[in-house]
Image (cartoon, rainbow, N blue to C red):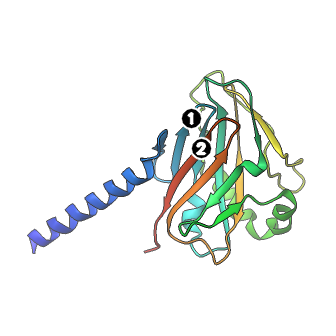
Amino acid sequence: MRKFSKVIVAATILFVAFVAFEVCAQEGVRPLKRYGVAYEGPEVEAAVRFYQAQRDIGEPWMVLVVHIVGSTRSGIVTIDRSAFTLITPDGRRLPMMSQKEFREVYGRIQTRIRRAVESAPPFRAYRGTIRRCTRWFLATPGRGFGVDELYVSNFEECSGPMVFAVPNGIQPGRWRLIIDLEESRADIPFELEAEE
């Protein structure tokens, strides 16, 4: 019986190592604790926090918190809202919600958004010269306006929630957030686990 337990433990460790390797096999991607992935590329550095998405398996909206800062090798980078695409485990491509769609569903997802944002620490807080920008793609009702373009630099971190409508609900598996930039493409994979 003891030998069987050791085999199960060894198999579990190998599986976790394989999943971590698969998620981080994308060049410039590394894990950030349990529910986060960081990306470092030629134009931007980004972090995707997916704690709330993991909690919402089966739900029709995926809430991610995304942090973006310009790379130290780039100047100011312009990122359009349409640059973001979420790829599902079965290969479907989902656009980020528009500000109008976001306001329409906000009442149903505001608790998820608050929980997601509160669980996501700043990405680059340790860099003393970094400051937080006040612009983001989605703005909660009564809190300003969502923008269609962000201008990011290496001294300012922009962050906020991104919401994607997921037909048939969020499923476990490997998801990818794609950011199509002017000179490069950020491909940021993350893994949602099946509920126990």
Disc 2 residue crowd, few under 14, some 14–19, many 20+, Cα 10 Å = many
Q: Name the residue rendered at 33%, 56% in the picture.
A: 18
Q: Quadrant of residue 97?
A: bottom right
**In the image, what residue type sits under mark 2?**
Ala
Secondary element under disc 2, as helix, strand or loop, is strand
Image quadrant occupied by the N terminus:
bottom left
The percent position of residue 159, horizontal first and vertical second, equals 70, 43
Position of residue 73 relative to residue 124, above or below, is: above
Q: Does 94 sit left or right of 53 as displayed?
A: right
Secondary element under disc 1, as helix, strand or loop, is loop
Q: Nearer the viewer, residue 44 or 47?
A: 44
- Whether residue 18 is visible, yes or no, is yes
**In the image, what residue type sits under mark 1?**
Gly
Q: Name the residue rendered at 66%, 35% in the picture.
A: 183
- What residue sits right under mark 1 in the picture? 41
Q: Name the residue rendered at 60%, 32% in the picture.
A: 125
Tell me whether circle 2 and circle 1 mark residues in contact (CB < 8 Å): yes
As drawn, the label of residue 109 is none
Q: Name the residue rendered at 85%, 62% in the picture.
A: 103
Residue that protrudes farthest toward the front in the picture: 183
Image quadrant occupied by the C terminus:
bottom left
The percent position of residue 48, horizontal first and vertical second, equals 59, 49
Q: Nearer the viewer, residue 25 or 107?
A: 25
Q: Nearer the viewer, residue 14 or 110?
A: 14
As drawn, the label of residue 186 is 2
Disc 2 versus disc 1: distance between alpha carbons? Answer: 7 Å
Position of residue 143 relative to residue 193, above or below, is: above
Mark toward the start of the polypeptide (2 vs 1): 1
